[in-house]
Image (tube, helix red, strand yellow):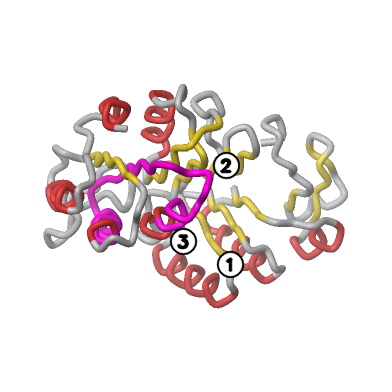
């Protein structure tokens, strides 16, 4: 992140206050860090058993954007901190996500910089790897902002929320949605488009065409229960809304 140009003003690790990493000062608590530095966002790399406390600490110290890279945070914990963040006016991206990037400006996460170049395509994705692959295919066009929202069943910021933000973003001209089986976020995006609440052109891709039912595939949220969130239901929802759906990640470029 530092090499990409993101302004990292402080790190926090209990017991390591007073040290430095790559010339960035480290503090014992977030409270200590925000006393010394203006802070817009926090990124959490803390192991799952401690991650929720780290998110609470960031929110309670006034940080309004918290990106959670950590995987395996318990579902009930995520439900609680998601509700708490909304009450406090903070936004959580993730967990179990690669973060976000505004090409040529800032990177907050673990996305590899190579596939990204300043442009006009907004990408929202449940899959880190597919994000990188698809971004590489459209690199010559470029991206406005790329957001990995995470693959867990409960996440802080949903796909439909990001799509609505892209629709209002003057830097974004078209939107790519990278979804997968499980949950109903993709269907909610399609509903918004069908109701005319999303004006910009969207292209979609859904992973999991051959995934068996009742079996979790990769991400914790990538599982079909009680017939909800199937590959077919998502494809049909997008087609019903007039959103072109790519058969493979590489077909997206042809549909733009």
Find the distance from the CA under tag 1 to the CA under tag 3: 10 Å
In the rendered image, the vertical position of residue 212 relative to residue 158, given as above or below: above
Q: Residues within 10 Å of mark 2 (few under 14, many from 20)?
A: many
Relative to 71, 118 lies left or right: right
Along the line of sight, the residue nearer the viewer: 147 or 151: 147
Residues shaded magenta: 164-192
For the residue labelled by badge 3, is the local secondary structure a helix, a strand or a loop?
loop
Q: Which residue is drawn at 50% across and 51% down?
A: 169
Q: Are marks 1 and 2 in contact (CB under 8 Å)?
A: no
- Magenta includes 237? no
Q: Residue at x 27, y 53 (%)?
A: 186
Q: Do the residues labelled 1 and 3 touch (CB within 8 Å)?
A: no
Relative to 57, 82 lies left or right: left
Residue receiving disc 1: 90
Q: Earlier in the sequence, mark 1 or mark 2?
A: 1
- Rendered image: mark on residue 1: none
Residue receiving disc 2: 109
For the residue labelled by badge 1, is the local secondary structure a helix, a strand or a loop?
loop
- For residue 2, which quarter of the picture? top right
Residue receiving disc 3: 156
In the rendered image, the vertical position of residue 156 relative to residue 46, given as above or below: below
Find the distance from the CA under tag 3 to the CA under tag 2: 15 Å
Along the line of sight, the residue nearer the viewer: 146 or 21: 146
Find the distance from the CA under tag 1 to the CA under tag 2: 18 Å
In the rendered image, the vertical position of residue 101 relative to residue 87, given as above or below: above
Q: Earlier in the sequence, mark 3 or mark 2?
A: 2
Q: Where is residue 185 in the image (x, y as percent from the top left)?
A: 30, 57
Quadrant (top left/top right/bottom left/bottom right) for the N terminus: top right
Q: Position of residue 256 (x, y in %)?
A: 32, 32
């Amino acid at each position: 992140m530092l090499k990409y140009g993101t302004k990292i003003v402080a790190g926090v690790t209990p017991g390591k206050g007073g040290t430095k990493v790559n010339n960035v000062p480290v503090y014992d608590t977030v409270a200590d860090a925000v006393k010394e530095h203006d802070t817009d966002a926090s990124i959490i790399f803390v192991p799952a058993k401690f991650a929720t406390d780290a998110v609470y600490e960031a929110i309670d110290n006034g940080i309004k954007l918290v990106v959670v890279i950590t995987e395996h945070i318990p579902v009930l914990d995520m439900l609680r901190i998601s509700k708490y963040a909304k009450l406090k006016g903070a936004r959580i991206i993730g967990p179990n996500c690669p973060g976000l990037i505004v090409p040529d400006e800032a990177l907050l996460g673990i996305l590899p910089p190579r596939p990204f170049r300043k442009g006009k395509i907004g990408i929202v994705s449940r899959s880190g790897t597919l994000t990188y692959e698809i971004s590489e295919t459209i690199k010559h066009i470029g991206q406005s902002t790329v957001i990995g929202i995470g693959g867990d069943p409960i996440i802080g910021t949903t796909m439909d929320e990001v799509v609505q933000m892209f629709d209002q973003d003057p830097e974004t001209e078209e939107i790519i949605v990278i979804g997968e089986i499980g949950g109903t976020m993709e269907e909610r995006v399609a509903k918004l488009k069908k109701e005319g609440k999303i004006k910009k052109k969207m292209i979609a891709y859904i992973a999991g065409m051959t995934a068996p039912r009742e079996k979790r595939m990769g991400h914790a949220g990538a599982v079909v229960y009680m017939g909800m969130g199937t590959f077919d239901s998502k494809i049909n929802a997008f087609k019903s809304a007039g959103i072109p759906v790519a058969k493979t990640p590489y077909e997206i470029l042809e549909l733009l």
